[in-house]
Amino acid sequence: MSTVAAPIAAARPRRFSRRRLGALAGHVYVWAVLVVFVLPFLTLLGYSLTGPGGTYAVQNFQYVLGSFGDNLRQSFLVAGMTLVINLLVALPGAYAIVRYPFPGKRALFSLLSLPLYVPGAVIGISLVLVYNFTYHLTTSIFGLVFAMAVGTFPLMLSPIVVALKDLPLSFEEAAACLGASRWQTFWRVVFPLIGPGVSAGLMLTFIIVFNEYLVTLFVHPPDVTTAPLRVFNLVRTAGLAPTTAALAVTMQLISFGAILVFFKVFGTRYLKGTYLI
Amino acid sequence: MSTVRLDRVSKLYGTTVAVDDFDLDVADGEFVTLLGPSGCGKTTTLRMIAGLVEPSGGRIFFDDQDVTWLAPRQRNIGFVFQTPALFPHLSVADNIGFGLSVKGEKKPAIAAKVEEMLAMVGLGGYGGRLPAQLSGGQQQRVALARVLATDPRVLLFDEPLSALDRNLRDTLKYSILDLQRRTRKTAIYVTHDQSEAFAISDRIVVMSGGRAEQVGTQSDIYLNPQTSFVAEFIGANNGLRGVITGRRGEADGAAWVIDADGRTLVGADRPGLAVGQAVVAYIRPEDIEILPDGNDGGFANVLEGTVDRVIFEGPVAQVRVDVGGRELRVDVSGNERLELMRREGGVRLGFDEVSVIPSPA
């Protein structure tokens, strides 16, 4: 026995072998990155719970349910209306782009993605001009919603286009041969199967619109102040108060929650690779 | 239950002709297979019958109804695809009930039909599963049940077995035939696999270049190929190019005499040929016999050659014989094939009158 055990013992790695040092460096790197990325949020969280004189004060969050509640409601309203408009534009748009041949298709698709590459300030100024001279939308929440939709619908369109491209035509053909109308085929077969794409689009749009502040600053009507705009205004007028930090933390948690909810409801169900039989 | 008639149907993609003035008559309850290599237009033809592709010309009739411009959903067809194309988000039962559900059928009626169909394809009790939980063969059977549930006038199959492994193909092709016989539905089946076509068809249409090369039963096509494409595509065949040099005999005993690179062959009579015409003489490998010394065996043709190699394939041994620069394949079965294994040198080959087919351009 001992003659067998001896060589194994000799083969045991030294305490600070090159491989172990490499693994250690890897861990340090991953943790360092995590700290760098998470630290700002933790700092914010800590500050939001700080009362006068460095005490612990959860009552900073009372304003979230008070006056700040209106701002959150308005943010949800704007985000929700934008989601509906984006979906109504992107679903038929993506279907046409993927399923039908027409001249200039690629050029059109590139053009439709343009809002992603235009700076928010440029969109903001141009929309203010457009609203002032043409549509008189400056006093309506629809002006703000329209601005959000213009800026974000490529985020909805692209994932749906990708999902549709991945969907074999034979599902639609099978449905048609079984007697389904185009409408039935779309809602019973196509729409459920592009679920991952739609949910990705919804999630991206929601996160961006809910937290958007620059374009909002330009085009928001006087009676509408979204949550990010309120935070910005508070910081500008009252400095960095812990109560303001509490509002910011709330926004952060809502965005985070939205991601979890969307993946829970839409995402994972179709993301198991089952729809490509 | 329906007859299907295609009248000079054609399909052009740009300037490429996919299907060229194609005629077809399928009787009620008949099982017709379109057989051909990839790109021969067989799938395009099937998709035009289904309404998934619009023809560039011609008309399509189910019974006496002109369906040429009807949408697929108005034709009441059952289309089985190469992939099962089951809706992955619906259970097996919902997949089978889909056709009835979109037609507004009541739920109890759908459930009853689904049970009946599941039993019919031998998958009773599988209704609650998702397609991904079934094997490839089971999925294709559900696809069959799904199209049969709508009681279609015509069943259309687009290489439904090509994605399955070989053992499964063999069992499933007889299941398909069995279901078609039991439901007495008109069926059109597309495949590039001739053993599949031979196993299940009442009639076979051999297609090439968007046209029907020959239409007939299995034995028609195998024993009397009308074109050199059919002669070469169906089964193994030896083709020798030559020229008709004469005709001998009369009436039933008439035969063509062919000169193939200096070898004289006697070919079966066939109308439409003339002296001086370029032809190809075909002899099936299993129709050639290796003659014992000093005996011609009464064959119309005898050729001398040397054995190149012998390939033992199990039931038959394939002998490659060099006859003056041309290689002939001879299939030998029975005990004779075992004696052949060490055969070398010169042999004499005997065979009956060859099939004579005009040389393709």
Image (spheres, coloured by chain):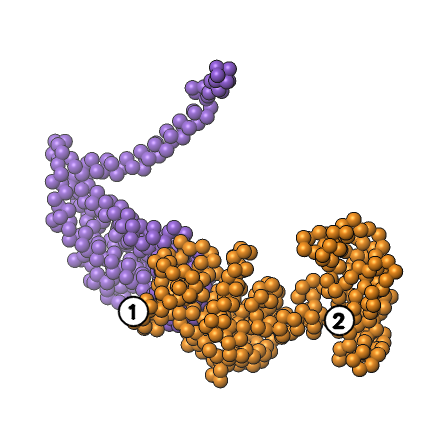
Which is nearer the eye, A114 or A127? A114
Label 2, label 1: how many angstroms apart (C-alpha)?
61 Å
Parent chain of label 1: B
| B329 relative to A211, above or below | below
Q: Position of residue A136 (x, y in %)?
A: 24, 66
The quadrant where residue A223 appears: bottom left
Task: Determine whether the residue tagged by mark 2 lies in a helix, strand or loop.
Answer: strand
Q: Is residue A73 left or right of residue A179?
A: left
Dot placed on the residue nearer the N-terminal end, 2 or 1: 1
Shown in orange, the chain is B
Shown in purple, the chain is A
> Are marks 2 and 1 in one subunit?
yes
State the residue position of label 1: B108
What amino acid type is highlighted by mark number 1? Pro
What amino acid type is highlighted by mark number 2? Ser
The quadrant where residue A90 appears: bottom left
Residue at x 81%, y 75% (from the top left corner): B256
State the residue position of label 2: B355
| B24 relative to A55, above or below | below
